[in-house]
Amino acid sequence: MSRSPSPPAFLQSSPSTSVKPSRYTFRHLHLLRQNSPSSPLRVIAHIDLDAFYAQCEMVRLGTPRDTPLAVQQWDSLIAINYAARPFGVTRMLSAIEAKKRCPELVLQHVATFREGEGGKWAYRDDASFNIKTDKVSLDPYRAQSRRILSTIKEEVSRQRDEIISSKDVPLEFQAARIEKASVDEVFIDLSSLVYAVLYQRYPELRRTPTASDKTTSLPTPPTTALEWFPEDGLVDLDEEETEEDDPDWDDVAMLIGAEITRS
């Protein structure tokens, strides 16, 4: 993976007759450091490995990305790679029909257990003909899922260590929280990492508020526009928001979260 995210490119602020105060307070910011679900600045990344079984088989078989491939379970398809989709190959399509639509399609049956073989799974050329005696094994995909989760944990830890080793870092911030949702999905609470990057980039946020002024609004972000990467998918604005509104700290936090996830 690449190095930790570099600061985003900010566009020059445009003249304005008034500055709209931030909707967020120092309390919200410090809750972010604690990965608290109470902070409206919280940033959660959802990592979804698309066509996961198909990707696992492409890696195992060394299949080029532009080669159509589908994962077969008995006589139906359960995963389709992107190269196969333009041919109309879809999940739950029969293997016979899929081959008619895409003669170049690589069909890989899932691994199976077979009676009398010591409980060991294997990839078998005749698996689709032994539906009454074989049992499906998803162990190869679970193993790959564990490896990917381990890689994500290592990378998140590396980014935290890199922040700690640099200058202008908060005295204390928690590690990111990682929760596995399924074999091909994981959620990462990036809040504490986002807090640390905010602390580094924006000196105006480093002030330690007293108990009496934790509800004081944060200073407004020093920009009127954020530059997102072309591959970033933006969500619609809330009904009360417009494109002309200056970004607030939730927008900046989301941008930093996208940088961390992308890296």
Image: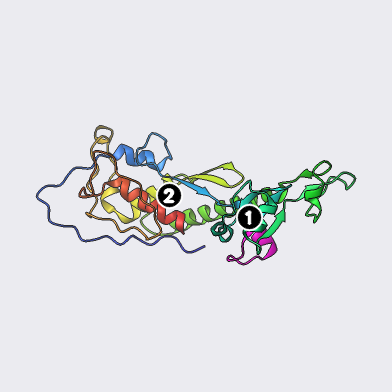
Q: Residues within 10 Å of mark 1 (few under 14, many from 20)?
A: many
Is residue 164 in view? no
- Contact between marks 1 and 2 (CB within 8 A): the answer is no
Q: Which residues are magenta?
A: 55-70
Q: Count up the numbered dots.
A: 2
Q: Which residue is mark 2?
A: 193
Q: Which mark is residue 70?
A: none
Furthest residue toward right: 116
Q: Position of residue 78 (x, y in %)?
A: 64, 48
Magenta includes 110? no
The picture quadrant where one finds residue 242 is: top left
Of residue 247 and residue 73, the one placed in the foreground of this image is 73
Q: Nearer the viewer, mark 1 or mark 2?
A: 1
Q: Is residue 134 left or right of residue 139?
A: right
Which amino acid, mark 1?
Ala
Q: Which residue is mark 1?
A: 54
Q: Position of residue 185 (x, y in %)?
A: 56, 45
Measuring 52% from the left and 53% from the top, which residue is drawn there?
157
Measuring 35% from the left and 47% from the top, which residue is drawn there?
235
Which amino acid, mark 2?
Leu
Q: CA distance from mark 1 to mark 2?
A: 32 Å
Is residue 248 in view? yes
Task: Decide: is 140 above or below 66.
Answer: above
